[in-house]
Every structure is written in C-alpha cells, then in structure tokens.
Amino acid sequence: MDNNYKAQIEAILFAMGESVEITKIANALEIKPGQVKKIVKEMQSELDSSDRGIKIIELDGAYQMCSKPEMYETLIKIAKQPKRQVLTEVLMETLSIIAYKQPITKSEIERIRGVKSDFAVNKLVEYMLVEEIGRMDTPGRPLLFGTTEEFLRRFGVESSDNLPVITSDMIEEFKHQAEDEVTLKSND
C-alpha cells in the first residue's frame, strides 16, 4: 500500500457523510490519532482555497466533510427545496439556555425562561439542534436535553466547550437592552 493517507481520509469522510471520530480514522489507516490530525490540518489548508467548494470541519474529536457556506445558493438551485429553518427569538433563547446549561431538563429551562417551553424544545429537536441525552436520576426521571453535532456544525463551533464565554458585563448590557426594549414597547 502506498500510504496515500489524504486520499483515504477523503474517501472515508466523503463516503460516511457524517462526522467520523479521529480514533476510528486512525484505526482504519493503522496510524496514530496525532498523525490523522496533522494530515487533516494539511487537507483543511488545501481546501481553504477559494476554488474549492468543500471543507473539512472538526466536531468534538471527529471530522466531517461538508459544503462551504458560500456554496449554499448554488446548492439551493439544485436541491429545489431549501429547508431554511427560521430560529425565532424564542427558539434562540431556548437553544442558548440548553447550550450553556446542558444537560438540562425542560422544567429547568422553563424556570429560567419563566414560561412553558414545550413548543420551543420540540421544535429544536425537530431541527436536530437539540436531542434527548438521558434521564435525570430523580423522581419522575425527567428527560435531559443537550445540543447535537448539527448544532455545532450550524454555529461553527468545534465543541460545546468552545461556546463564547458570557461575562458579567455582557449580562448587564443584555439587561439594559431588554429594559430599553420594554420601555419602547410600553411607549407605543
């Protein structure tokens, strides 16, 4: 075998169509995970050029081949049924709570939001941004929710550990914005 690792990795990622763990790629190629990372970094650099329509992304210790976002309009023309899911303010608020507090139950989400969240959580599950990740070991065994690989892909984050850190200054700014918005609405 000529050890054409780049071609083999490309074939694996293309054929699988979803993320593949670094260790699985390493086992398939009979090389160390560190070597896989080095080879994929080279491949990512090569694919970054503007004349390429695909890229390789890292998602929580796994790699996936996908189309570049700037190819979206072209892909819509061929797919003829773009499924653009609109994330309303309610959905974004709920998704943010889940992303930062996961694993989290629906009742904890509702306690933070102050309103029922069944619709929002169900919609996020439907959009494959959130999934059931287990049950809490308490009476009633409520479902626990967390974000998915699709969430990481859509928001361009390698893992939930890499979410932006929210500082106390930012929280104060958000409070001021919310108060200003309430004041504007009450003046209408």
Image: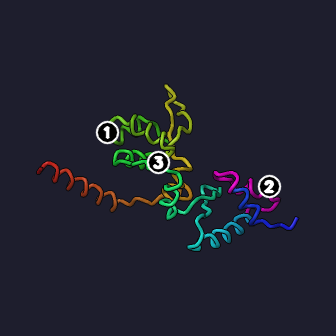
Q: Is residue 118 above or below residue 186?
A: above
Q: Position of residue 62 (x, y in %)?
A: 65, 56
Mark with earlier residue (2, 3): 2
Q: Position of residue 57 (x, y in %)?
A: 60, 61
Mark 2–mark 3 distance (CA, rounded to whole Å): 35 Å
Mark 2–mark 1 distance (CA, rounded to whole Å): 49 Å
Dot 1, crowdedness within 10 Å: few (<14), some or many (≥20)?
A: few
Mark 1 lies on a secondary structure that is loop
Mark with earlier residue (3, 1): 3
Dot 3, crowdedness within 10 Å: few (<14), some or many (≥20)?
A: few
- Residue type of the residue flagged with mark 1: Gly
Which quarter of the rendered picture does the N terminus lie within?
A: bottom right
- Which quadrant of the structure image shows residue 49? bottom right
- Residue type of the residue flagged with mark 3: Lys
Give the dominant element type of the magenta stretch: helix, strand or loop: helix
Mark 2 lies on a secondary structure that is helix
Q: What span is in magenta?
A: 14-33
Residue of label 3: 83
- Residue 24 drawn in magenta: yes
- Front residue of this view, candidates 86 and 124: 86
Looking at the image, the residue that sits furthest to the right is: 1
Q: Position of residue 181 (x, y in %)?
A: 21, 53
Residue of label 1: 114
Q: Is residue 27 left or right of residue 120?
A: right
Residue of label 2: 28
Q: How is the image coloured?
A: rainbow
Q: Which mark is residue 7?
A: none
Mark 3 lies on a secondary structure that is loop
